[in-house]
Amino acid sequence: MIAFNYETDFILENEEITKEWIVNCAEENDFEIGEINYIFCDDEYLHKINMEFLQHDTLTDIISFDYTMGKLIGGDIFISVPRVKENAKEFGVTFKEELHRVIIHGVLHYMGYKDKTDEEKQLMRDKENSCLKTVNL
């Protein structure tokens, strides 16, 4: 089950299509969706979580808490909508493209993909791009 929750005035368009896309990306990588909660919020909300749980005094676009067990994906994914908008401008892409990149980024973490080293970042980016090619929004 995938649920979208809102702690801001943002509302995701095409929730059902987005859910299907996430499930398909997981299945293409031999994973199954358990329970994933997306929480869309603002910078202040996510900064508080970053400080409280990770002791990081920085703004970020996404924080994910992983509850995956084996091949059954689960977790909570917090996304700062203003941060995604800023990043889209910075990277020269549409808000929708950057939003979907962040949405699938959290799921890819649950599949075991990391992004600490340059090599890991490149592999993560390649997997994001592969999933983004299949989104029909």
Image (cartoon, rainbow, N blue to C red):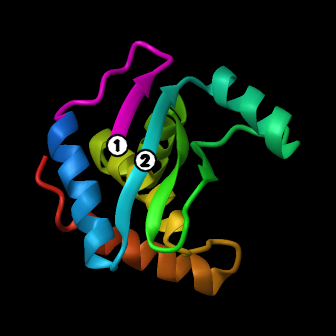
The residue lying at 22 percent from left, 64 percent from top is: 24
Count residues near mark 2 (Cα–Cα under 10 Å), then give few for <14, some for 14-19, many for 20+: some
The residue lying at 55 percent from left, 43 percent from top is: 76
Which is nearer the eye, 112 or 101?
Answer: 112
Q: From the image, give the main secondary structure of the stretch colored magenta.
A: loop
Whether residue 9 appears in magenta in the rendering, the answer is: yes
Provide residue 89's location: percent of width, then percent of height.
43, 42
Does 101 sit left or right of 86 as displayed?
left
In space, the residues marked 1 and 2 are separated at their CA atoms by: 6 Å
Q: Identify which amino acid the numbered label 2 is placed on.
A: Glu
| One can see residue 7 in this view | yes
| One can see residue 81 in this view | no
Kind of element beneath mark 2: strand
Residue with the mark numbered 1: 2
Does 33 sit left or right of 102 as displayed?
left
Q: Quadrant of residue 3?
A: top left
Range covered by the magenta-colored residues: 1-14
Count residues near mark 1 (Cα–Cα under 10 Å), then give few for <14, some for 14-19, many for 20+: many
Does 69 sit left or right of 51 as displayed?
left
Mark 1 touches mark 2? (CB < 8 Å): yes
Q: Identify which amino acid the numbered label 1 is placed on.
A: Ile
Kind of element beneath mark 1: strand
Marks counted in the figure total 2
Residue with the mark numbered 2: 35
